[in-house]
Amino acid sequence: MSQIQTDVVSEGGRLAARAAEQDLPLRLLGGVAIRLQARDKLPAIFVRDYGDIDWVTARGTTRATQGFFEDSGYTPQVRFNALNGKERLMFYDDINHRRIDVFVGTFRMSHEIPMDDRLQVSPVTIPLAELVMTKLQVAELNEKDVKDALTLFHGYPVGEGDDSAINRVRIASLCASDWGLWRTLTTNLDTCLRRLDGYDLPVEDKARMAERLEQLADAIEREPKSRKWRLRARIGERKRWYELPEEVTGDPE
C-alpha cells in the first residue's frame, strides 16, 4: 500500500504521478488542481486550505480507478460506489480524514460539463477552461469559489486554445448550447468582476484580471446560440435552471 502524504497538495501530485505511470486517464479538478496550476505565482490573498481531493476519469475505467485508489491506500465507500459507480466514486483517507471524489466522464453539480474528450489535453489536471467552468457553474457562488476562479484569471490569459490559456472557444461553445450554464456562468463572471476590487492586489494585476474576465464574457455573448438555447431562454428564470448540490451528493473542494 502506498504512503499517503499528509499535505493535500503533495498527495494530489503523488496520485497524479502514479496514475500517469499506469496510463490511467485520471485528472485533478477543484482547489488542489487550481493550486498546482498556480505554481509559485499564487497571490497570498487567494491562499486557502483544501479539505478533499477531486478527480475526473474516463468512462469505462471505473474498475481500474477503484483498484488504483485502493492500492494507493484509500478506503472505498462501497455502497455509494455500487449505486453511483457509472457517474461518481468516493474513497476515504482514514488517517488524514480526507475524501476522494471521482467524477466519471462528466462533471455534474449545479450544471453538467462533459469531460471525456478533454482528459488528454493536460497531463495532471483538467484543462484550464474546464477548471474555470467547474468553479463558475456553482449556482450559489461562495468566497472559496470566487478566490479559486480569480486565481486562474490571475495566472493565465484568455485565448483560443488550451496552450497555457483559458480556452474561450470551449467555454463559449458549451454556454451557447446550454442556457442554464450560460445564465449561471455569465452571472458569476460578473460577480467575480465586481468582487475583484475588494482583494488586496496590485492595481496592474486587477486591471489585467478584469480585462480577462471581460474578454471571456464578451466571447460567450458573441457565440451564436443553438436552437435549444433559444427555446430555453424563452422560459428564462420562471423555471429553475440548475441542480441543487444535495441532489447530486456533496460539494467538491
Image (cartoon, helix red, strand yellow):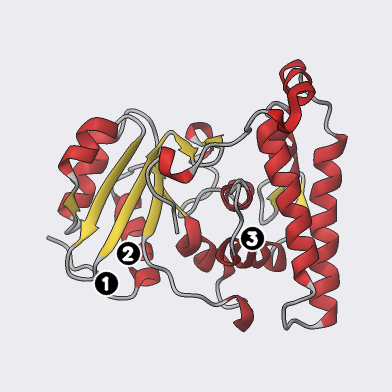
Contact (CB < 8 A) between labels 1 and 3? Answer: no
Q: Disc 1 or disc 3, which is closer to the eye?
A: 3
Percent of width and height locating residue 137: 61, 46
Along the polypeptide, which appears first: circle 1 or circle 3?
1
In front: mark 3 or mark 2? 3
Residue positioned 83% across, 68% down in the render? 208
Tag of residue 117:
none
In this rendering, the answer to whether 110 lies above or below 69 is above
Residues packed near mark 3 inside 10 Å, few (<14), some (14 to 19) or many (20 plus): many
Q: Is mark 1 in CB contact (under 8 Å) with mark 2?
A: yes
Q: Earlier in the sequence, mark 3 or mark 2?
A: 2
Residue at disc 1, secondary structure? loop
User: Which residue is disc 2 drawn over?
Assistant: 14
Q: Quadrant of residue 52?
A: bottom left
**Residue 227 visible in this rendered orientation of the protein:** yes
Q: Could you say where residue 217 lies in the image, as x and y percent from the top left?
A: 81, 47
Q: Position of residue 58 (x, y in %)?
A: 39, 35
Q: Which residue is mark 3?
A: 149
Percent position (x, y) of residue 71?
Answer: 16, 52
Q: Amino acid at mark 3?
A: Ala
Residue occupying image coordinates x 72% and y 37%: 182
Q: Which mark is residue 5?
A: 1
Q: Which part of the image, by quadrant, shows the C terminus? A: bottom left
Q: Secondary structure at mark 2?
A: helix
Residue type at tag 1? Gln
Q: Amino acid at mark 2?
A: Arg
Q: CA distance from mark 1 to mark 3?
A: 26 Å
Q: Is residue 218 left or right of residue 21?
A: right
Q: Earlier in the sequence, mark 1 or mark 2?
A: 1
* Separation of marks 3 and 2 at Cα, in angstroms: 24 Å
